[in-house]
Image (cartoon, grey):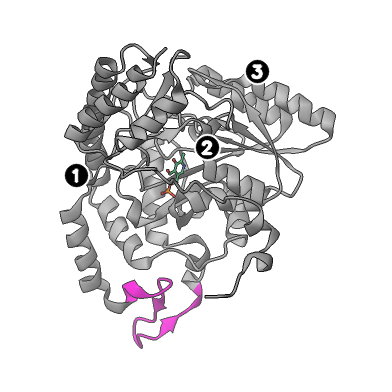
Amino acid sequence: MTFDPTDKLSDLAAGGPALFFPDPPAQVTFNFDQGIAAEETFPLDDFRRLMGDVLDRDGGRALEYISFGYEEETDQIVYLPSYIELMLGHTGLREEVARWIGKTQQVEGLGADNLILTSGSVQAIALAVNALVNPGDGVLVEKATFPYAMRFMQMRGADIRTVEIDEHGLVVESLVERLEEMRRDGVTPKLLYVIPTFQLPTCVVMPEDRRRRLLEVAEEYDFVILEDSIYADLRYGGDPVPSLLSMDTDGRVIQSHGFSKVLAPALRIGWITAPEPLIHALASVRQDLGVSQWTCRMLEQYLKEGLLDPHIERANAVYRRKRDLAVKAVREHCGGLVSFDVPDGGYYLWLRIADNVDWEKAQHEAAMAGVFCRPGEKFLGQEAGQGYLRLAYSHAPDHELERGIKALGEAIVANAR
Ligand SMILES: Cc1ncc(COP(=O)(O)O)c(C=O)c1O
């Protein structure tokens, strides 16, 4: 191929590395990098049965863009009633998910009209940013956060300000400081993107009083809160804390969520829950034609049969076991050179490596031994991220957790001064 497309690229595409594509210097033996669900939790039998049942029941209708309505007598398609599914996704699944959220988060009055289904919750975040943020508008994010969300905000030309986090999540005083800065700079704050439960990458949880204060600040400075709840149901310790969505009396919290972490990422079904006018705004910036009817019909049945909650309970038992194994291995093999808080849920340990460790060398040696974690720099930037490490224990088989963390520990201990 001789054609060089470099000078044909849009400014957006040419503007930098879109996302993190890891390039480990050696073969990956112990993959603690990606936050993926444990394969052993996938409900293969239920999915196999329900995918077949849906085809048996609905035939080709399960394979359309939308659920067409049919005249009973003539069997003619009635187009209009379900056209909205091109924008919002399958109505039956929206109803079921609304019911599930209403029940698990104690939110009253939610229905299908409060949901838009998306291709994973990552698309939900992109839609929220596109629907709410103009170039130059102010967006606030936690200091360490989900890099994809940052990328969508950058692509939109947002003025992004970062807010401190501590062991209880987002620091509201720091948020107010950033808002005051914006006010002085003449920047309109539009959106706060926050992961209040099992924050990424730290896995910390924001307590209820802090959440209440956050909602007051949002009202005072008049911005929308996008609550990312993707890990919130993966709790296997500690007491539950109400979601921001459930505490909101003002209609300014929208919540992204999805099935990737609690069920399986390949479903590619996420959503946003929001007041109806905001759902319409999100739909208006959608650039595809909805989500898979077949998958949605299968998931509708899965929820209707009440299979989701027991599944999450079983999955959480698996993650609790993996967390305990990972915690034990880090304590045993990292020689007191690593500090961390034990998370009550989620997929990750957020490790802080002691200052007397030559982290660059240790990291390289760990990588050469096949240990693959996500470096703190990917969340906090080059300088602030040094010496931090996100270790995903969710996906690795149990025996790899022990062996891989032992290899990581050896690299750390060998490079302590
Ligand atoms: C914080 C956070 N939000 C959203 C997502 C998106 O997941 P999905 O698009 O699979 O729902 C992820 C995936 O890793 C995540 O870590």
Where is residue 186 shown, x and y percent of the image?
A: 84, 35
Comparing labels 1 and 3, the label whose residue is closer to the camera: 1
Tell me if residue 65 is in the magenta stretch: yes
Q: Is mark 1 within 8 Å of ligand 1?
A: no
Q: Amino acid at mark 3?
A: Glu
For label 1, count other residues whose C-alpha is less than 10 Å away and answer few (under 14), some (14-19) or many (20+): few
Q: Is residue 382 above or below residue 41?
A: above
Where is residue 388 shown, x and y percent of the image?
A: 46, 25
Q: Which residues are magenta?
A: 61-80
- Residue 173's disc is 3
Horizontal side of residue 139 vs 80, given as left or right: right
**Cα gap from disc 2 to disc 3, whole angstroms:** 19 Å
Q: Residue at x 81, y 30 (%)?
A: 183
Horizontal side of residue 263 vs 203, given as left or right: left
Q: Amino acid at mark 2?
A: Glu
Q: Is mark 2 within 8 Å of ligand 1?
A: no
Q: Residue at x 46, y 49 (%)?
A: 21
How many numbered marks, from 0 up?
Answer: 3
Quarter that holds the C terminus: top left
User: Of residues 361 and 372, which is closer to you in this image?
Assistant: 361
Q: Amino acid at mark 1?
A: Glu
**Cα gap from disc 1 to disc 2, whole angstroms:** 29 Å
- Residue 40's disc is 1
Q: Is residue 363 above or below residue 283?
A: above
* Label 1 residue SS: helix
Where is residue 366 shown, x and y percent of the image?
A: 34, 31
Q: Residue at x 43, y 71 (%)?
A: 66
Q: Main secondary structure of the magenta part?
A: loop
Query: Of marks 1 and 2, which one's residue comes earlier in the chain?
Result: 1
Which residue of the protein is positioned furthest toward the bottom in this rendering?
74
